[in-house]
Image: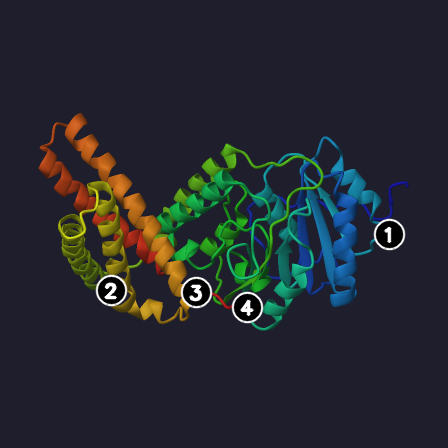
């Protein structure tokens, strides 16, 4: 098929990364409702299929009122050229070839700058984001949301055949995000999602400065997003081409968080430390110490269980005690926003994991203070307990008893 010369490539916007409040009249004469950007790099094997599927779905949902914008970073496999060849058959398709810039996040913003839609979206070009979820995301926008996010971490979501290591890395990155930017990352259950749509008005004229692949946290951190909604989806395994996920993406994610955290507006979003809640958490923890010792005494003296088994069982009884009191008292106001046995079991499972991590952290701190710095072992133990108490409180507040501010 020959290239359709009557429809040339889109000009690449230049200058600051800022979406205009209205489409540039020089770029188009007919705005549409929805503009979907598909950032690509070496997706030649997938581009025809993704364009075909998206066009079919959107032709039914928004006939003649949408556009697909493929933004390609000058792929060696000439993805941009293959996409341009499809333009004769797909009148809503537009293609941009970037030759001087690189990176998924900036590709998305450049696409949005050239877009004409009132609603702006992004979807991966590798078919790992199920296209049919687009319709549900559009429905949430039409019902008033400023931002609609495809989430792998709510009901209906999942990660297909991800291995344990990849799951742990993803969750670990999210946990770090909650610690660094709690009021930004905590607004969604899946801040690392690359599948979402946002109203143009919510990000118009906001100066963007992204780093890496996680454009969603840039939108949350710098945009004027009020109402957020989420839709569950199952992240699919790549069928064609090679994955672009490397350690570099995780490093860039952390650097991106630090960059956002340093901005004045984001800094002012942080919560004042909840002292009263922390004191309740400390009192519950103290009760757990007494429960631990009492159960340990009974198991050893009355039942004659081995010391290791007694230690494990008494510690777990103390964890159960602490969880119940925290769920009822310390974080009771939050827990009441998450009713039901299933939600309580999820909070209990997370609480157990945080406590286990705290025990490991305490052991490392005691060893570090005693062995490396020569601190008295009992003083080292006391200091480690104090540090871990803050750890357990803050992580439980941001993870175990967290309510994302979204409609689902």
Decide if residue 62 is in sight here.
no
- How far apart in space, not on screen, are marks 4 and 2 (Cα)? 36 Å
Q: Nearer the viewer, residue 244 or 392?
A: 392
Q: Earlier in the sequence, mark 4 or mark 3?
A: 4
Please tell me which of labels 4 and 1 falls first in the chain: 1
Q: Which residue is mark 3?
A: 342
Percent x, y of residue 274: 24, 61
Name the one closer to the observer, 168 or 35. Answer: 168
Q: Nearer the viewer, mark 4 or mark 2?
A: 2
Label 2: which residue?
A: 325
Pointer 4 with pointer 1, Cβ within 8 A: no
Q: Residue at x 67, y 64 (%)?
A: 135
Tell me which residue sits at (57%, 45%) in the image. Answer: 105
Position in image of residue 178 (x %, y %): 38, 51
- What residue would you read off at disc 4? 145
Along the viewing direction, whichever of 358 and 64 lies nearer the viewer = 358
**Residue 295 seen in render:** yes
Kindly report which numbered mark, 1 or 2, lies closer to the viewer in this rendering.
Answer: 2
Question: Where residue 129 sits: x, y (%)?
Answer: 64, 51
In this figure, which colouring scheme has been used for the structure? rainbow
CA–CA distance in space, label 1 to label 2:
63 Å
Which residue in the protein does label 1 denote?
89
């Amino acid at each position: 098929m020959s290239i359709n010369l009557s429809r040339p490539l889109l000009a690449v916007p230049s200058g600051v990364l800022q979406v205009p409040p209205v489409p540039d009249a020089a770029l188009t004469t007919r705005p549409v409702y929805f503009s979907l950007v598909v950032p690509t790099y070496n997706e030649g094997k997938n581009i025809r299929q993704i364009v075909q599927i998206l066009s079919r779905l959107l032709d039914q949902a928004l006939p003649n009122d949408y556009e697909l914008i493929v933004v390609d970073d000058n792929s060696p496999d000439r993805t941009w050229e293959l996409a341009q060849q499809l333009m004769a058959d797909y009148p809503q398709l537009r293609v941009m070839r970037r030759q001087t810039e690189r990176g998924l996040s900036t590709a998305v913003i450049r696409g949005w700058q050239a877009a004409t839609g009132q609603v702006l979206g992004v979807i991966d070009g590798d078919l790992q984001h199920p296209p049919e979820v687009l319709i549900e995301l559009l429905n949430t926008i039409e019902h008033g949301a400023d931002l609609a996010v495809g989430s792998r971490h709510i009901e209906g979501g999942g990660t297909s055949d991800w291995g344990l290591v990849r799951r742990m890395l993803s969750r670990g990155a999210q946990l770090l995000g909650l610690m660094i930017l709690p009021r930004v990352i905590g607004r969604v259950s899946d801040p690392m999602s690359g599948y979402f749509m946002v109203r143009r008005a919510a990000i118009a004229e906001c100066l963007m400065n992204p780093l890496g692949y996680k454009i969603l946290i840039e939108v949350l951190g710098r945009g004027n997003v009020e109402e957020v909604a989420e839709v569950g989806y199952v992240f699919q395994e790549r069928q064609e081409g090679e994955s672009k996920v490397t350690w570099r993406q995780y490093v860039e994610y952390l650097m991106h968080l630090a960059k956002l955290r340093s901005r004045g507006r984001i800094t002012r979003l942080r919560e004042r430390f909840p002292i009263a809640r922390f004191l309740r958490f400390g009192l519950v923890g103290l009760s757990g110490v007494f429960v631990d010792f009492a159960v340990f005494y009974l198991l050893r003296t009355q039942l004659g269980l081995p010391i290791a088994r007694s230690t494990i069982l008494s510690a777990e009884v103390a964890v159960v005690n602490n969880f119940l009191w925290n769920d009822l008292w310390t974080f009771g106001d939050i827990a009441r926003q998450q009713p039901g046995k299933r939600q309580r079991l999820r909070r209990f499972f997370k609480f157990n994991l945080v406590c286990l991590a705290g025990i490991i952290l305490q052991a490392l701190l005691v060893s570090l203070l005693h062995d490396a710095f020569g601190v008295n072992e009992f003083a080292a133990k006391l200091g480690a307990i104090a540090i871990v108490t803050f750890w357990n409180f803050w992580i439980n507040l941001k993870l175990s008893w967290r309510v994302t501010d979204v409609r689902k």
